Image (cartoon, grey):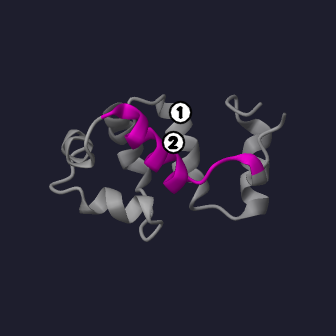
Amino acid sequence: MSNTVENIPSVSIFLDAAIVASGRSIAEIAEDAGYKSPEMLRLFIENRAKIPIDHAPRLARAIGCRGPELFRLVLRQFLDRQTWAEVEQYSVYSS
C-alpha cells in the first residue's frame, strides 16, 4: 500500500504510541531528548506545538524509533498536501 497523506499517522499519534510502547515515563524520554521538562513532549502529543526538525534525531533515539521514520513525520507537519505528495515521489522511505 502506498503511503499517502491519508494513511500516514500524525506525528502526535506516532509520538504518543512510541512513548507508551517504550515502557518509559514521559519525563525520562524528555530528559533523554534534551528537554528540561516533559511539558514540551505533552505539547507535541496534544498537537499544540510542532517538533522542530533539528530535534527529530535526538527524539527518535529517546523513544527508540528509526530516525528517518520520525523525521518524515516531523517534516510532514510543516508541508501542505501537495508539497508532501511531491516529496514522497522522491523519498527512498516511501512505499
Residue on which disc 1 sits: 68
In this image, 80 relative to 22: left or right? right
Q: Quadrant of the C terminus?
A: top right
- Secondary structure mostly seen in magenta is helix
Residue on which disc 2 sits: 71
Tag 2–tag 1 contact (CB < 8 Å):
yes
Q: Which amino acid is tagged 2?
A: Phe
Residue drawn at x 50%, y 40% is 70
In this image, 83 relative to 72: left or right? right
Residue 90, placed above or below residue 14? above
Residue drawn at x 25%, y 62% is 39
How far is the residue under mark 2 from the one under mark 1?
A: 5 Å
The percent coordinates of residue 75 (x first, y second) are: 56, 51
Q: Which mark is residue 89?
A: none
Q: What segment is highlighted magenta in the picture?
A: 7-23
Q: Which amino acid is tagged 1?
A: Pro
Q: Exactly how many numbered labels are in the figure?
A: 2
